Image (spheres, rainbow, N blue to C red):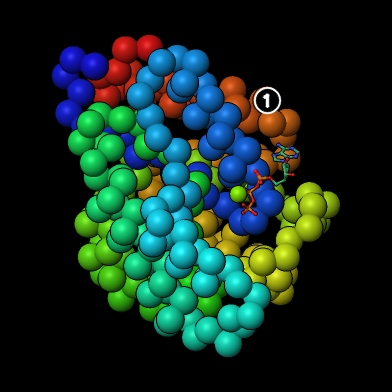
Amino acid sequence: MHGVKRGILISFEGVEGSGKTTQAKALAEWLSASKIPHIFVRDPGSTEIGEKIRGILLDRKNRGMHAKCEVLLFLAARSQLTYEVLLPALKEKKIVITDRFSDSTFAYQCYARGLPLRLVTVFNRFAAAGLKPDLTFLVEIEAAKRRERGKYVDRMETEAEGYHQKVQRGFELMAMRARKRYRILDGERSVDALHQEVVHHVKEILLRKGYKI
Ligand SMILES: Nc1ncnc2c1ncn2[C@@H]1O[C@H](COP(=O)(O)OP(=O)(O)OP(=O)(O)O)[C@@H](O)[C@H]1O
Ligand SMILES: [Mg+2]
């Protein structure tokens, strides 16, 4: 890792059931097998405080939560994750894989729920210490296919289908705006085919950043 300045932040984004966690975990296993130091986190979550906030966000009893309360809770959890886990790991030159990050907030709370993107972007920058992913995988999937993949019962997942389409559109817009860091994956391909594609892109960035693989 001679010449490596800091670690690499890789995020997985997409609507529920698209296959983010499946691919993020497979990547973590590949990094383990390749003996490349890394951590795997989920946002919100992966700190004691963040997991408690996640519980509040996903609790079906909290249907009355205002959109502003919701976004601030997501940012609160992300802030704790950033300072407690992400920044130290990146400083230690680890690869950080995160199951969702800031773009989920922009897609769900801004594009789909209508909160002001510019303001939330500023709050998010404050919460996440300006941290941005170096590489983002957007796993895309059609609504019908998504529904076939198991039961979705937590608070976020019981939202109307139109909402998910807006979320999907939000992710697509962000991917267009940040082409350099985005890699769009066709979530309807096999788990293995997608994993090969993920590894291909990750190898590329590892080499570019000076890692030995
Ligand atoms: N490429 C694929 N082909 C078919 N099924 C898949 C594929 N990827 C994941 N699945 C299955 O679809 C379901 C959802 O996958 P996964 O949990 O990875 O999605 P997710 O995007 O993390 O969802 P969530 O947002 O709810 O956490 C799981 O049952 C998983 O086994
Ligand atoms: Mg998941």
- Total numbered badges shown on the rendered structure: 1
Look at 78% across and 58% down and name the residue there. Answer: 151
- Residue 106 visible somewhere in the drawing: no
| Up/down of 181 relative to 154, above or below | above
- Residue 93 visible somewhere in the drawing: yes
Between residue 34 and residue 204, name the one nearer to us.
34
| Up/down of 169 relative to 13, above or below | below
Look at 46% across and 22% down and name the residue there. Answer: 31
- Left or right: 40 in relation to 88: right
Rendering quarter of residue 71: bottom left
| Up/down of 147 relative to 53, above or below | above
Q: Amino acid at mark 1?
A: Asp
- Horizontal and vertical percent position of residue 83: 25, 53
- Left or right: 92 in relation to 212: left
Crowding near the residue tagged with mark 1, few <14, some 14–19, many ≥20 C-alpha atoms within 10 Å = few
- Horizontal and vertical percent position of residue 190: 73, 31
Look at 38% across and 62% down and name the residue there. Answer: 49
Q: Secondary structure at mark 1?
A: helix
Rendering quarter of residue 147: bottom right
Rendering quarter of residue 128: bottom left
Look at 63% across and 38% down and name the residue there. Answer: 22
Residue that label 1 marks: 192
Between residue 74 and residue 84, name the one nearer to us.
84
Quadrant in which the C terminus is drawn:
top left
Between residue 209 and residue 22, name the one nearer to us.
22
Quadrant in which the N terminus is drawn:
top left
| Up/down of 180 relative to 160, above or below | above
- Horizontal and vertical percent position of residue 114: 49, 79
Establish whether ligand 1 lies closer than 8 Å to the Cβ of label 1: no
- Horizontal and vertical percent position of residue 43: 45, 54
